[in-house]
Image (cartoon, grey):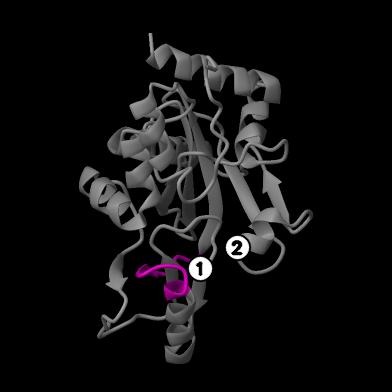
């Protein structure tokens, strides 16, 4: 009987559209994007099929199903579960042994994995609120890459917002973030993870349709950079979501 359910679920069921689809059937109103765009964004395989034809730059890669073999792998490469979140099961492989171990790790979570070219670059993210990109934030893990430990262990990552990058590059990253959301049909708010290599080439990695919303999460930091407080951000998300039902 609530006016609006604030969606704060992460990972399977919450971000893959199942809860949203259930709420739609029951006539329950909720914050965030719908079930279809959630499902597309959660599946890295589906997202690539939707985003790449729209001209959005993404790392080259192939989808592997359990039991299938891959003939040639350029090292280093990144191995990740197709529908996982929070970088769980993600590995960087530099040789055949590491690659086999990475496959075992990723396949332990699900039956479909993605093998992508490794992009040596800076890790950045761009939130999109009501179709408009917020300032770019840079994530600098003190060790390794932005894996599960570095995402959730306090003090293991340095975050800078706005990111210290040229204005034209920042604008381009914001453009691609908005374009990703448009292509996948994502509304209300989301966060698009991107990489910037040494030659200033941009690569979009994935769309997070229910990004972290703790005080120290990335999207509240981006909102704060343009003068939007945490409380104002949550209210804005509710207002945008309510408008969809009017």
Extreme bottom residue here? 97
- 135 or 211: nearer the viewer: 211
- 11 or 202: nearer the viewer: 11
Res 172 seen here = no
Q: Point out residue 133 in the picture as x, y percentages from the top left corner.
A: 48, 30
User: What whole-number distance in Å separates the C-alpha atoms at marks 2 and 1?
Assistant: 7 Å
Q: Point out residue 178 in the picture as x, y percentages from the top left corner.
A: 39, 33
Instruction: Check the image and report above or below for 182 versus 150.
Output: above
- 150 or 239: nearer the viewer: 239
Task: From the image, tell me which residue sits under label 1.
Answer: 90
Q: Is residue 77 left or right of residue 54?
A: right
Q: Residues within 10 Å of mark 2 (few under 14, many from 20)?
A: some
Residue at x 56%, y 33% (from the top left corner): 135
Secondary structure of residue under mark 1: loop
* Quarter assignment of residue 221: top right
Secondary structure of residue under mark 2: loop
Q: Mark 2 and 1 residues: CB-CB less than 8 Å, in contact?
A: yes
Residue at x 37%, y 31% (from the top left corner): 34
Range of magenta residues: 106-120
Q: Residues within 10 Å of mark 1 (few under 14, many from 20)?
A: many
Task: From the image, tell me which residue sits under label 2.
Answer: 147
Is residue 198 inside the magenta stretch? no
Pick whichever of labels 2 and 1 is earlier in the sequence. Answer: 1
Q: Point out residue 55 in the picture as x, y percentages from the top left corner.
A: 25, 46
* Quarter assignment of residue 147: bottom right
Residue at x 65%, y 32% (from the top left corner): 220
Residue at x 60%, y 65% (from the top left corner): 145
Quadrant where the C terminus is found in the figure: top left
């Amino acid at each position: 009987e609530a006016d609006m359910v604030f969606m704060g679920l992460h990972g399977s069921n919450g971000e893959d559209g199942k809860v949203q689809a259930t709420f739609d059937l029951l006539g329950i109103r909720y914050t965030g994007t719908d079930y279809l765009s959630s499902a597309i964004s959660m599946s890295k395989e589906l997202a690539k099929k939707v985003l790449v034809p729209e001209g959005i730059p993404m790392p080259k890669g192939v989808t592997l199903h359990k039991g299938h073999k891959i003939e040639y792998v350029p090292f280093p490469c990144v191995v990740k579960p197709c529908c996982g979140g929070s970088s769980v099961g993600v590995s960087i492989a530099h040789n055949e042994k590491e690659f086999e171990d990475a496959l075992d790790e990723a396949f332990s979570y699900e039956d479909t994995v993605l093998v992508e070219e490794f992009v040596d670059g800076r890790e950045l993210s761009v939130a999109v609120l009501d179709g408009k990109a917020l300032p770019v934030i840079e994530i600098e893990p003190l060790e390794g890459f932005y894996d599960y430990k570095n995402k959730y262990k306090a003090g293991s990552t340095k975050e800078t917002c706005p990111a210290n990058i040229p204005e034209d590059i920042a604008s381009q990253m914001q453009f691609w973030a908005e374009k990703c959301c448009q292509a996948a049909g994502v509304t209300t708010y989301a966060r698009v993870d991107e990489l910037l290599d040494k030659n200033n080439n941009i690569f979009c990695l994935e769309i997070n349709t229910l990004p972290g919303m703790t005080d120290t999460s990335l999207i509240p930091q981006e909102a704060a950079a343009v003068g939007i407080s945490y409380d104002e951000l949550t209210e804005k998300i509710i207002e945008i979501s309510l408008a969809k039902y009017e």
